Amino acid sequence: MGLLDKRFETGNVFITSLDNLLNWARLSSLWQMQFGLACCAIEMMAASASNFDIMRFGIIPRATPRQVDVLFVAGTVTLKMASRIKRLYDQMAEPRYVLSMGSCANCGGPYWEHGYHVLKGVDRVIPVDVYVPGCPPRPEALLEGIIKLQEKVRKESLVKKSA
Amino acid sequence: MTAEEIYNSLKAKFGDAVLEAKLDALQPWILVASGRTKEIAFFLRDDPVMQFDFLMCLSGVDYNDGRLGAVYHLSSMVHRHKIVLKAQCTKENPHVHSISAVWGTANWHEREAYDLVGIVFDEHPDLRRILLPYDWEGYPLRKDYKVPEFYNGMKVPY
Amino acid sequence: MIESKTLPTRYVTRPGEIRTSSGKTLRTDEMIINMGPQHPSTHGVLRLEIVVDGEIIVDVIPHIGYLHRCFEKHAEHMSNYQQVIPYADRMDYVAAMNMEHGYAVAVERMLKLEVPERVEYIRVIMAELQRIASHLIAVGTFGIDAGAFTPFLYAFHDREHILDLFEMTCGARLLYNYIWVGGLSHDLPEQFVDKCKEFCVYFKPRIKQFNDLLTYNEIFVKRCANVGVLPKDVAINYACSGPMLRASGVNWDLRRDDPYSIYNRFEWEPQVGKGEMGTVGDTWDRHIVRMREMEQSVKIIEQALEGIPAGNVQAAIPKKIRPEVGEIYARTETPRGELGYYVMSDGSASPFRVKARSPAFVNLSVLPEISRGGMLADLVLIAGSVDIVLGEVDR
């Protein structure tokens, strides 16, 4: 203790808890799965293009579920597609998060009443962390949803059960 | 050619396969026998005066009185005329002869009509469901369709 | 290479066998690869079952329906013909104005309704702006399929200008509910005409820049030329329409050949593929047809902006839409091709049957025919050049 105690005044040393460090690392690089289903996918693509740019949040689109942290379910989930979504979610490695984007993924959207082939909300097959409302949500709304997800990750702890 | 001339020409060639026509409607239509659609379609495509080379649309309809029907919208890029053909069948015997040998696009359209309305197209090369899952039961666009409660463990209604 | 010592040396190879350099025969087999429904290159939830022999494609079997959202059932249950419009524009979400326009034209023809001149001009401007926006997505994602990421960013940046114009008019960026039966939901704001003219001036050099970046790039040309050739008679037999048909050399455009709005008042030309870099009807032709159509759309917009008359855009919207018993099929030209609506009415206020004949559904059915014999990497480009939007394929 005597050698190190209060010797470093000019910076270069951070003291933090392991929880904070790990959460900061995880929320700053939430890799996303390229999984656009319907109209919300176009807004997701617009969000990753140059005007709104989600890559500055550390979110890189990857093609395979093994390498991603977050699954943006963007668009309507149909009954035919639901089993594939479950399979993709199962293939993701923990800690994994799901952001449900748009009304159709939240609750069935405009197809809630007569859609015989539409799953009324993706939370009927996989657990969802953040819901982003809108039809389609603006890219800024998606960014707010991502920030909310980052807040959720920031509050996690190693000792408590999480995603 | 006008709709009247097309109707007369078809009546002359196919006689009793051409059942009725409504030539004063907004878009005149001709009802043909559901078993002879392929021959009539070949004639309409290959005859040099008609030359209906473009099948615009093929729809399946449930008329809500026990009849099912297929509606064919044809047009000709050469002569710039259009005609509507209809073929009807009953719910108990929902068979219409396929025309996928005439226009390649009819293949997927007929699969869709089979999938949603339940019309079976005879001699179709590959008649199976196209939009709904392969193990779906029922034909959703029929007027008396009841939405199932569960599908593979997922609740379907809201 | 595995040499089998049990197979005898024969002088003739049978089908499915190849001869190695030492004279032994090697048996090959076909493999079935599944592509999708989650795949970065399939433009949505499309599943392709590909039968390959090594790298050469023997057959492609598309499976669709992963986005079937029951448009036709919803249309039958709506209590009003106007309420179908939001569902219509969710079908092809990339070209929503054109979908609404097609439905409005169909119902207006059934009602024998004439819309005011101002409405026609604004509809043409919106439809052509939407055509540019849709083609920008098409060429941007086509570039990604070929491996070029930068044109995608350029395309989306230009598209944001168009979406700003739409947002100024009706409040929405992607799905508008703007073109109603008989008129429009809002009139143009005051700054719209000036901002639109500024956009046209800004956009014309951007097309040239995009062409220099992607279209005439030698690697891109080598990848796209002579790939996925669609012959003219196959295209007509399979009822292909839009840029797919025009790229195969058929000079057919519904805006001129089956007129539905005031396009005959403007000077513009449908663009036809000529096989400049390869064969007529290959993927490069489809790409250049889309690029040139964007230039023509800018021309139409500029001419339309000069001549918008004054008027009330909501004057002709009927209070109750109750057509007489009958049916109609009306077709319009969307960025993907011929969109047709078959609307049947039984005299009541809600439609009896609305069938949407979507261009992407029909254009996709020709995919197996044009990709046989090509390689696996070519299939990605061919599927990208068909320019499908799965919301429209599955409805």
Image (cartoon, rainbow, N blue to C red):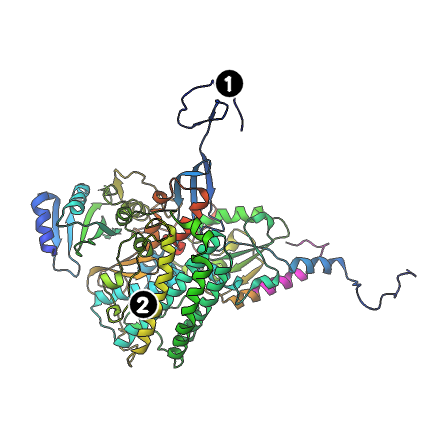
Disc 2 from disc 1: Cα separation: 73 Å
- Considering only vertical position in the picture, is A30 above or below C238? below
Residue C148: image x %, image y %?
A: 50, 55
Residue B143: image x %, image y %?
A: 29, 53
Q: Nearer the viewer, residue C24 or B10?
A: C24
User: Which residue corresponds to mark 2?
Assistant: C82
**What subunit carries mark 2?**
C
Q: Nearer the viewer, residue C226 or C185?
A: C226
Query: Within the magenta stretch, is there residue A162?
Result: yes
Mark 1 residue crowding within 10 angstroms, few (<14) / some (14–19) / many (20+): few
Which residue corresponds to the image point at 85% horizontal and 65% vertical from the top-left?
Answer: A8
- Secondary structure of residue under mark 1: loop
The span picked out in magenta is A145-163
Residue depth check, mark 2 versus mark 1: number of the one nearer the observer: 1
Left or right placement of residue A105 versus residue A22 in this view: left
The amino acid type found where label 2 is placed reads Gln
In the picture, which quadrant includes the C terminus of chain C? bottom left
Residue C24: image x %, image y %?
A: 48, 22
Query: Within the magenta stretch, is there residue A44?
Result: no
Q: Which mark is residue C6?
A: 1
Q: Which mark is residue A78?
A: none
